[in-house]
Amino acid sequence: MMNVEPIILALVVIHIIGLSLIIGSFALQLRRKQGFEFGTMLIGAITQLVTGLALVGLLQVADEDVNNAKIAVKTIFAVIVLVSVLVARARQGKALAAGTSEKKAALPFLHLAGFAALVNVFVAVLWH
Ligand code: HEM
């Protein structure tokens, strides 16, 4: 059987970088009023889903324990991050076209995305 341990470690590194893209971009934009940038959070959200699912598969290959309830919760919150960023981006686009407040349109969903990512950090670290 192939040794998947180095691949698992590489994926964990990418997983942590993906997490920093979401929360870093979120924190940077908290005080912004318009012109929010969603690309970084979007890449982070997709990275988390892809590397997270790949990790689950490889941990099973390596015969390591996987907590299915924890994975289910993390998947739900990761999807909330992704959908919130997409909704925020769409709402900002509409507000821009209508000349209404970008902050009102986008910021609540930016908050939701950042909050859901933070929840996943707590779940990842505290639930064993
Ligand atoms: C916003 C989304 C996510 C964030 C912020 C996040 C955060 C983290 C963090 C901080 C760790 C390291 C924890 C530790 O080693 O104690 C971790 C590990 C892990 N995550 Fe995620 N995660 C996210 C999404 C996901 C998803 C969607 C899955 C699976 C479908 C997943 C599966 C895993 C697995 C399997 C590990 C453990 C790797 C190991 O230590 O062997 N994560 N995650």
Image: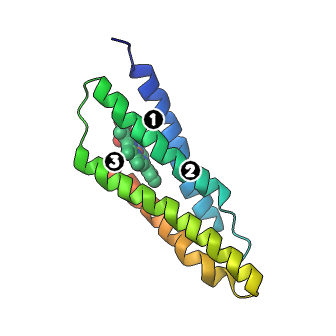
The one of 121 and 89 positioned closer to us in this rendering: 89
N-terminal label among 2 and 1: 1
Q: Residue 74: x percent and y percent?
A: 35, 53
Kindly check if marks 2 and 3 are in contact, taking CB atoms under 8 A apart as contact: no
Q: As rendered, which of 21 and 58 lies closer to the eye?
A: 58
Residue highlighted by disc 1: 12
Label 1 near ligand 1 (CB < 8 Å): yes
Amino acid tagged 2:
Gly
For the C terminus, the image quarter is top left
Q: CA separation, marks 2 and 3?
A: 19 Å
Q: Residue at x 70, y 82 (%)?
A: 95
**Residue 104's quadrant in the figure?**
bottom right
- Quarter holding the N terminus is top left
Q: Residue 44, which numbered label?
A: 2
Residue annotated with mark 3: 125
Considering only vertical position in the picture, is 95 above or below 53? below
Element assignment for label 3: helix
* 7 with respect to 90 (left or right): left
Q: Disc number at residue 98?
A: none
Q: Residues within 10 Å of mark 3 (few under 14, many from 20)?
A: few
Q: Residue at x 51, y 59 (%)?
A: 82
Q: Secondary structure at mark 2?
A: helix
Please report whichever mark, 2 or 3, sits nearer to the chain's N-terminal start.
2
Beta carbon of the mark 2 residue lies under 8 A of ligand 1: yes
Q: State how the image is colored.
A: rainbow
